[in-house]
Amino acid sequence: MARPRQFDEDRVLLLALERFWEFGYEATHTRDLAKAMDLSVASLYNAFGDKRGLYRRALDFYVERSFVDRVRRFGQLQPRQAIGAFFDEIIARSLDDPRQKGCMLVNSALEMAPHDPEFQRVVAGVLVQVEHFFKERVEAGQQDGTISAAQPADDLARMLLANLLAIRVLARARPEKALMEGLVRPTMAWLDHQAEGRH
């Protein structure tokens, strides 16, 4: 009979996530991971397989507690308010990171996805979900008159996705409030264009 695990899985996944998030996949060694997670190397392998398997689990953990959680919370808001709140939180998170780690998903897109078909599918799948969230909110806003219908919802959703990715890349190199807000402001104004006259 297998022995029960003697650790809190969420806790050790969070510790692994922090390590991968800061240093990336290639620069993170298994012994460093085990030490950061307060596990033996054998326990790490027994619980998560290899380093790649642990990275996949850490990435899933990140997505669940960032994007999925954000959609759950902001999906309850009015459409235009939800999009604004989404970007307000992204900018705040980007600025409140002294180590300038950026976004784990974007980091994975740049480091892992070009060389690993599984991670390419994982990252692409999450980006499709993000785009779908934006499209849903835009369509709802176009129906209630709070978001302009001058452009197709598909195009506006893709523009919002591009803004999100740009902000998260800037978070690593130029985490400047004015820069990030200046990137989002024209986009939000475009959503509002022609909508105000309907009220």
Image: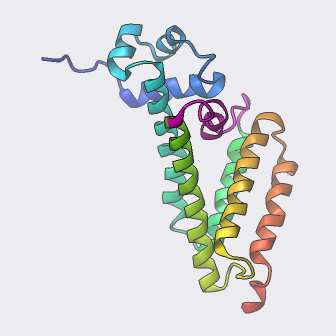
Q: Is 10 situated left or right of 2 in this image?
A: right
Q: Is 176 situated left or right of 166 in this image?
A: right
**Res. 187 visible in picture:** yes
Q: Is 111 situated left or right of 192 in this image?
A: left
Give the x, y percent position of residue 20: 58, 25
Q: Nearer the viewer, residue 161 or 181?
A: 161
Quick check: 60 above or below 126?
Answer: above
Which residue: 83% across, 56% down? 183
Which residue: 41% across, 8% down? 41
Colour scheme in use: rainbow
Which residue: 69% across, 32% down? 101
Quick check: 46 above or below 131?
Answer: above
Instruction: Give the number of callouts.
Output: 0
Q: Is residue 101 magenta?
A: yes
Query: Could you say which quadrant of the image residue 106 lies in?
Result: top right
Which image quarter holds the N terminus? top left
Q: Is 163 situated left or right of 144 in this image?
A: right
Give the x, y percent position of residue 55: 49, 27
Magenta residues, as a range?
Answer: 97-117
Which image quarter holds the C terminus? bottom right
Quick check: 25 above or below 118?
Answer: above
Give the x, y percent position of residue 163: 74, 55
Which residue: 82% across, 63% down? 185
Q: Nearer the viewer, residue 155 or 81?
A: 155
Q: Is residue 182 magenta?
A: no
**Res. 40 visible in picture:** no
